[in-house]
Image (cartoon, helix red, strand yellow):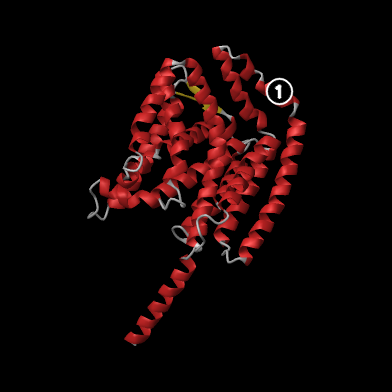
Amino acid sequence: MSLTLSMGRAALSADFATVKKGYIASPIYDWVFFIASPLIALAIGVAIAGTPFASEDVTLFGNEASISSIFIGTFIMAHLGIVFFRSHLNQEIFKLYPIRFTIVPVALFAAMCWSRWLAVAVSVLATWWDVYHSGLQTFGLGRIYDMKAGNDARVGRRLDFWLNLLLYAGPILAGATLMDHVQEFKQFREVGSIFFTRIPAAVESQRHWLSSIVVAVGVSFLLFYVAAYVRLYRQGYKVSFQKVALLVSTGLCSIYSWGFNSFGEAFFVMNFFHALQYFAIVWWMEKKNLVAVLGMQNSSWGKLVALAVLVMLGFGYGFWAEMTDSTNQAAYNIIMVIAIMHFWYDGFIWSVRKKLV
């Protein structure tokens, strides 16, 4: 009887290991927080569209906006801030790039305080770097799934890089939300830059051609991408189902939200799943380190306290940043520096190729 039970447990353990293989954390965790999160966010966006939650303004600390707008603004800022749990609290990562993590942000902040023109330029840059960075977050998750499937980190890397930029930026450039992004250039009016303030009008006049070019290039690249991966498969590449599902989920959400925005919640949807994915990957990768930093390795409450610290500090900073008046130049510069550092740091602290994941 004991032998039978032991064999049964061993079989169940083997089955679980087989099911878990290829996932970052576990099937449920990955599907909720990574793979299906774009579709979950899309469902939430459709559900709140036209409701008081999204359409009626409230006044909070002098800021007038809808509850959904305040929430997503806080969530965005929160996920930008928690990069420091990996870059600065993880000593293995920090020791690799000490100058990037200390001198560079201080120097950028000082430069922005010294030059109003630079401060405006950084603010506009943040909007477009966010588009680039968001596409590369999906790229990074996809590369981790490739690694989990047993593939070389260099195989198909460039193909995935361009595909993810296309899936995220393509619907913006060819769709309904293009001008929402381009309007950021009007900030240059504050420093009297005529050239940059003319960009929105110039883009508006060429939208039809831009959309046609993006669609033509996009369709051509998708055909090329599939053909290239068929060739790689024949050479031994192992297809990751998780990666394919992630790309499909993200692509459908991006095209429907950025491209059409028929329900008016594209900004909420795309930023919600992006921030959710980021909180999930930071927690999964850094939870042991955070528990150790808090000195709670031997406590049964260690992980729960660590998670609470991550969420509370993240959302605490996010709420402060969202409520901060943009006319408070010093505070606004701090917020922009943190955003830019987040975009930059993410390019190297999650590298599969450099074996940092």
Which of the two residues, 286 or 64, is positioned nearer the viewer here?
A: 286
- Crowd rating for badge 1 (residues with CA inside 10 Å; few <14, some 14–19, many 20+): few
Residue 66 seen from this side: no
Residue 199 seen from this side: yes
Q: Is residue 144 above or below residue 181?
A: below
| Residue drawn where x is 60% and y is 65% of the image | 235
Q: Residue furthest top?
A: 192
| Residue drawn where x is 52% and y is 43% of the image | 274
Query: Residue 196 vs residue 120: left or right?
Result: right
Indicate the amino acid at tag 1. Ala
Query: Residue 92 vs residue 160: left or right?
Result: left
Circle 1: element type: helix
Query: Residue 67 vs residue 313: left or right?
Result: right
Which of the two residues, 77 or 220, is positioned nearer the viewer here?
A: 220
Q: Quadrant of the N terminus?
A: bottom left
x then y, percent, for residue 146: 52, 58
x then y, percent, for residue 328: 43, 17
Q: Is residue 137 above or below residue 113?
A: below
Residue under label 1: 202
